């Protein structure tokens, strides 16, 4: 196998502002949407593997996260979906396989609902499907995560929380560090992406209306595991892959296995497998 294509960076414009994109590879397009408050660094280990397999991988930073400036106003999840459709336009991509993780999975669902012709297939890892009460509670709880301490102890507390509360002590310390750094880097201090996700009442309708091939991915230690199982049951004929551990850092910590699962799914879908 030849060496993985080099990563390229660029900015493109969309209705929510400039968007930073990491790109690697050539071939059929795969749009990778990250969780909040991470950014495209979540896919830094996966992109070279998928690119080497013959895919054009496109990992944008959601507006307000990573190196994308924050969006104006109070965008709804549908606005983020329209934004990513415009990002595909700017990248000259008519249709792509779309993979989303957690918040990114919600945005991928909204994109498929609003712009079905732009989505060839979906990989939904951790589906954010909540009932009305859960959405209200989560929306009300959204607040800036960090009060700065003179001794920097806020960083060690955040590190410990991610390591033990979110990750249950599994996975790499490097992944935990990126989670903490990504939250500190984010310019969306209001966490507008979270507010948009928790205000969205369209998840079940979007899942029920899917006509594209779908792969659901989860692990038992993921906070959205049960919701993902429910979503999988709602889509007859959909694929499902379950990892034994990984929680919310699975893609970063187990890139080869995740990439292999995605590639196996695409090979099962007529016309979606990479050319080489």
Image: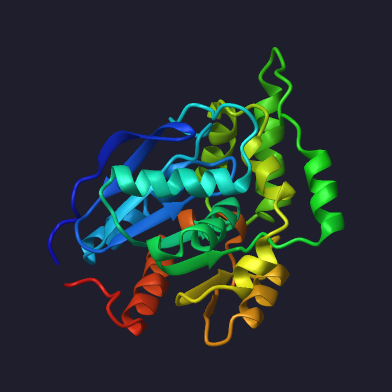
The quadrant where residue 109 appears: bottom right
Residue at (49% x, 40% y) in the render: 62
The relative height of residue 132 versus residue 162 in the rendered view (above or below) is below
**Image coordinates for residue 161, horizontal then vertical, percent:** 72, 42
Residue at (35% x, 40% y) in the render: 21
- Extreme-left residue of the structure: 2
Q: Quadrant of the N terminus?
A: bottom left
Residue 36 makes an appearance in the image: yes
**Image coordinates for residue 182, horizontal then vertical, percent:** 54, 35
Q: How many numbered marks have been drawn onto this rendered protein structure?
A: 0
Protein image colouring: rainbow
The quadrant where residue 227 appears: bottom right
Residue at (56% x, 43% y) in the render: 79
Nearer to the camera, 120 or 134:
120
Nearer to the camera, 126 or 158:
126
Residue 222 makes an appearance in the image: no
Query: Is residue 234 found left or right of 181 in the rendered image?
Result: right
**Image coordinates for residue 19, horizontal then vertical, percent:** 40, 35
Nearer to the camera, 45 or 123:
123
Query: Is residue 38 found left or right of 30 in the rendered image?
Result: right
- Extreme-top residue of the structure: 150
**Image coordinates for residue 82, horizontal then vertical, percent:** 49, 47
The quadrant where residue 276 appears: bottom left
Query: Is residue 105 found left or right of 133 in the rendered image?
Result: left
Residue at (51% x, 49% y) in the render: 81
């Amino acid at each position: 196998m030849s060496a993985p294509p080099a990563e390229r960076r660029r900015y493109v414009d969309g209705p929510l502002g400039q968007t930073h994109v990491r790109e690697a590879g050539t071939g059929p397009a795969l749009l990778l949407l990250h969780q909040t408050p991470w950014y495209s660094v979540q896919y830094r280990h996966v992109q070279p593997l998928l690119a080497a397999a013959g895919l054009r991988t496109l990992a944008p930073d959601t507006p307000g996260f990573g190196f994308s400036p924050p969006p104006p106003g109070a965008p709804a999840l549908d606005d983020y979906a329209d934004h990513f459709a415009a990002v595909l336009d700017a990248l000259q991509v008519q249709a792509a396989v779309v993979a989303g993780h957690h918040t990114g999975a919600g945005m991928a669902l909204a994109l498929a609902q609003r712009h079905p012709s732009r989505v060839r297939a979906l990989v939904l890892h951790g589906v954010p499907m909540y009932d009305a009460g859960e959405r209200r509670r989560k929306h009300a709880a959204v607040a800036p995560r960090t009060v700065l301490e003179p001794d920097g102890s806020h960083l060690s507390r955040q590190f410990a929380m991610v390591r033990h509360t979110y990750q249950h002590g599994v996975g790499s310390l490097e992944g935990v560090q990126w989670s903490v750094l990504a939250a500190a880097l984010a310019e969306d201090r209001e966490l507008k992406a979270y507010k948009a996700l928790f205000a969205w009442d369209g998840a079940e309708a979007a899942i029920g209306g899917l006509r594209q091939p779908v792969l659901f991915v989860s692990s038992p230690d993921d906070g959205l595991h049960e919701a993902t199982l429910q979503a999988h049951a709602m889509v007859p004929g959909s694929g499902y892959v379950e990892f034994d551990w990984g929680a919310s850092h699975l893609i970063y910590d187990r890139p080869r296995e995740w990439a292999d699962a995605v590639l196996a799914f695409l090979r099962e879908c007529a016309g979606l497998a990479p050319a080489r």
